[in-house]
Amino acid sequence: MANRWTNKLTRSDVTPEPIFMNRRRVLAGLGLGTGAAAGGAALLGGMPNAAQAQDALEPNAFEDITSYCNYYEFGTRKGDPAENAHMLTTQPWTIQIDGLVDKPGDYALEDILSQMTIEERIYRFRCVEAWSMVVPWNGFELADLLELAGVKPEAKYVAFETVLRPEEMPGTRFPVLDWPYVEGLRLDEAMHPLTMMATGIYGKTIPNQNGAPIRLVVPWKYGFKSIKSIVRITLTDSEPPTSWNKAAAREYGFYSNVNPTVDHPRWSQATERRIGGGLFARRQPTLMFNGYEEEVASLYEGMDLKANF
Ligand SMILES: Nc1nc2c(c(=O)[nH]1)N[C@H]1C(S)=C(S)[C@@H](COP(=O)(O)O)O[C@H]1N2
Ligand SMILES: [Mo]
């Protein structure tokens, strides 16, 4: 399915090690492709805002992305994860996939990766705290992993869990959150072609502080939905609990779609601060669904997005 992905991006050459990348879809997204990407070009031609696909999306520096992090298992200050996450052992790594699947079990990460094609995706990333970055991720679609395990027809949600190792994760010795960190998506959100499992940034193995060896990336939702260092994925028929909702239900809902018209109870979500923009950089307007409205709005048709925040 070469045309499942219609993300907007512009730079096709940010990766220092392009040899590992499948650039076919990147080219399709730009309407520059030939042969395999011909369908992509046709799709782009049919998009109402094909011009918008040419929006400038300048990725943040590797240094910004890997030094300004949220990973509370390693501490709550932005620099803590970069300082402490080297303690996490990421090899070998196994993901338990269970619940409403045809083939439950422990999946070795290397076996998963041997069946996936790693591609590059440049996505906006918007934290609920109102800062943002642009990140060139490497990874594969979550849908491809779920298809490996075989999703049963009764499944409606996907639950995710981060590894919990207090001896390697100093932040978990404090009850900042109810550990392990857990997150969830509705099945259609999980199967959406924009939803990816990331294993790299800028063509390099993903640094521990960013969620090594494998983390979720859901670009139209606030950053906390993009759970790091995943060890368990469970298909369920009811909405799974999520860490920030458990911690403060009034402030963090299950959906957590980026929405400039629904403020956090304690601050506005109308604008954001782009990391790396400098001290005097202007705040920029936050985009509906973080700029992915065309791709994902249909998932929420008829839903009250204020009630389902
Ligand atoms: N396990 C785990 N996953 C997590 C977090 C966390 O504290 N623990 N923080 C979340 C938040 S609030 C954000 S904004 C992003 C930050 O990702 P980054 O540090 O790679 O930018 O990770 C999310 N995933
Ligand atoms: Mo966040």
Image (tube, rainbow, N blue to C red):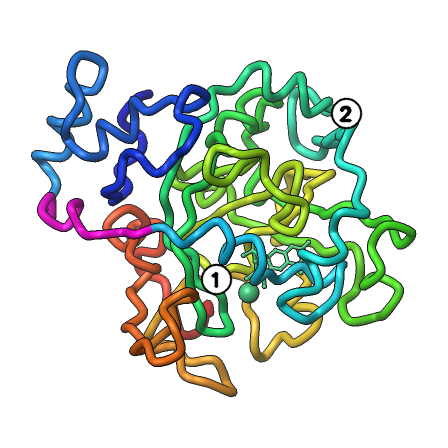
Q: Which residue is the extreme one toward the right?
A: 167
Q: Which residue is mark 1?
A: 222
The answer, for residue 293, to whether it is visible in the render is yes
- What range is drawn magenta here? 48-58
* 147 in magenta: no
The answer, for residue 238, to whether it is visible in the render is no
- On the image, the x and y values in percent for residue 142 come to 51, 34
* Residue 288 location, quadrant: bottom left
Write the residue at 44% across / 27% down.
Answer: 17
What residue type is disc 1 on? Answer: Tyr
Write the residue at 27% across / 51% down.
Answer: 57
**Is the shortest distance between ligand 2 and the CB of mark 1 under 8 Å?**
yes
Compared to residue 257, the image places residue 267 above or below, namely below
Q: CA distance from mark 1 to mark 2?
A: 29 Å
Give the secondary structure at mark 1.
loop
* 51 in magenta: yes
* Depth order, front residue of 199/191: 199
Q: Horizontal placement of 95 versus 188: left or right?
A: right
Q: Quadrant of the N terminus?
A: top left
Please tell me in which quarter of the rendered image ligand 2 is found: bottom right
Q: Which residue is the extreme one toward the top?
A: 35
Q: How many marks?
A: 2
What residue type is disc 2 on? Answer: Asp
Compared to residue 160, the image places residue 112 above or below, namely above
Q: Which residue is mark 2?
A: 106
* Crowd around label 1: few <14 · some 14–19 · many ≥20 (10 Å): many
Write the residue at 33% across / 73% down.
Answer: 260
- On the image, the x and y values in percent for residue 88 come to 79, 44
